[in-house]
Image: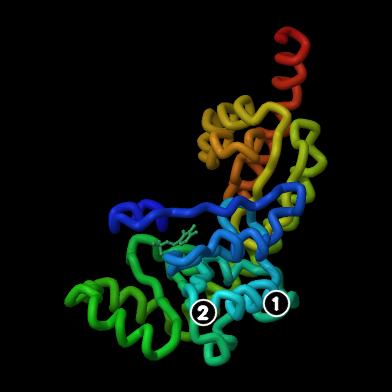
Amino acid sequence: MYAVAARIQGAEVVRVSLDPARGFALDAAAIDAAVQPGVKLVFICSPNNPTGNRFEREALLALARTLEGRALLIIDEAYAEFAQPGAGEKSLASELPAHPNLVLLRTLSKAYGLAGARCGVVLGAPELIALLRKIIPPYALAQQTLETVLAATEPPELAAAAARIALLRDERARLAAALARCPAVLRVWPSEANFLLVEFDHPGCVFDALKAAGLLVRDLRAAAPLARALRISVGTPEHNARLLATVRGCTALSAASGANGP
Ligand SMILES: *Cc1c(COP(=O)(O)O)cnc(C)c1O
């Protein structure tokens, strides 16, 4: 969507690819090289969609310092709440005072399940926020959105959300381990988001079987380095059990197509 928004503004988009061979790690040198004069905004999503990995805090901060005076470094933290517990702070928010060109985006659409409310937050230097205040449309948030968001951020609701997020992380670990044991699965990438990036020997068969079972996953086969990958959102325990049963059933399917087809 950032690329779509940029094009609507007539801005050029420069893409820097992540390399699966490096575990989709941040390639700061490649980004630095791509930030030619005229590049003003650098967007990075961490944990990243659809790869699921979170970039190293120090690597992001070093990049912010490298870009200072040249470009804003905008980190999309839409999936921050799902990051691995005990692996350090989940957000870069505490780093903002030391990095004037660092901007963070958060949303209520994912961990808080409020995608329909259309509410998120930008965190950044006071000068930047003052500028955004000048150009934000009047009455940008509907009253019903405000009421929904205020109700969802009361202490009991936040506690319930934290419990849901903890359950999701447990289910993510369980699902990742179980998928890794399925013969149809080539690889389950480590994830700190609410989904798993999974490579299959026959992703098309798995996609169709899941669809027939009433489970929609994201087909990533059009994205070159992910030609065998599906992005699978972690569901309720019941959804995850149905997903596993379906993927296990795909073994016979892919074995049969392998035996009969080219
Ligand atoms: C879902 C998602 C968001 C959240 O978008 P909203 O407009 O706040 O609903 C932001 N960034 C990424 C990468 C996402 O996947």
Mark 1 closeness class: few <14, some 14–19, many ≥20 residues within 10 Å? few
Q: Looking at the figure, which quarter contains the C terminus?
A: top right
Closer to the camera, 262 or 131? Answer: 131
Q: Is residue 134 above or below residue 52?
A: below
Tell me which corner region of the image, top left, top right, bottom left or bottom right, holds residue 164: bottom right
Tell me which corner region of the image, top left, top right, bottom left or bottom right, holds residue 225: top right
At 43% from the left and 54% from the top, the residue drawn is: 13
At 72% from the left and 50% from the top, the residue drawn is: 189
Disc 2 residue type (three-letter): Leu
| Sequence-first tag of 2 and 1 | 1
Closer to the camera, 69 or 240? Answer: 69
From the top left corner, tell me how far across and down residue 217 is, in percent: 54, 41
Residue at disc 2, secondary structure = strand
Q: Residue furthest left?
A: 138
From the top left corner, tell me how far across and down residue 136 is, in percent: 24, 75
At 53% from the left and 92% from the top, the residue drawn is: 97
Q: Is residue 201 visible?
A: yes
**Total marks drawn?**
2
From the top left corner, tell me how far across and down residue 117 is, in percent: 33, 66
Q: Looking at the figure, which quarter contains the N terminus?
A: bottom left
Q: Is residue 66 above or below residue 28?
A: below
- Residue with the mark numbered 1: 58
Q: Which mark is residue 102?
A: 2
| Distance of label 2 from label 1 (alpha carbons) | 13 Å
Disc 1 residue type (three-letter): Glu
Residue at disc 1, secondary structure = helix
Ligand 1 shows up in the quarter that is bottom left
Q: Is residue 211 above or below residue 137?
A: above
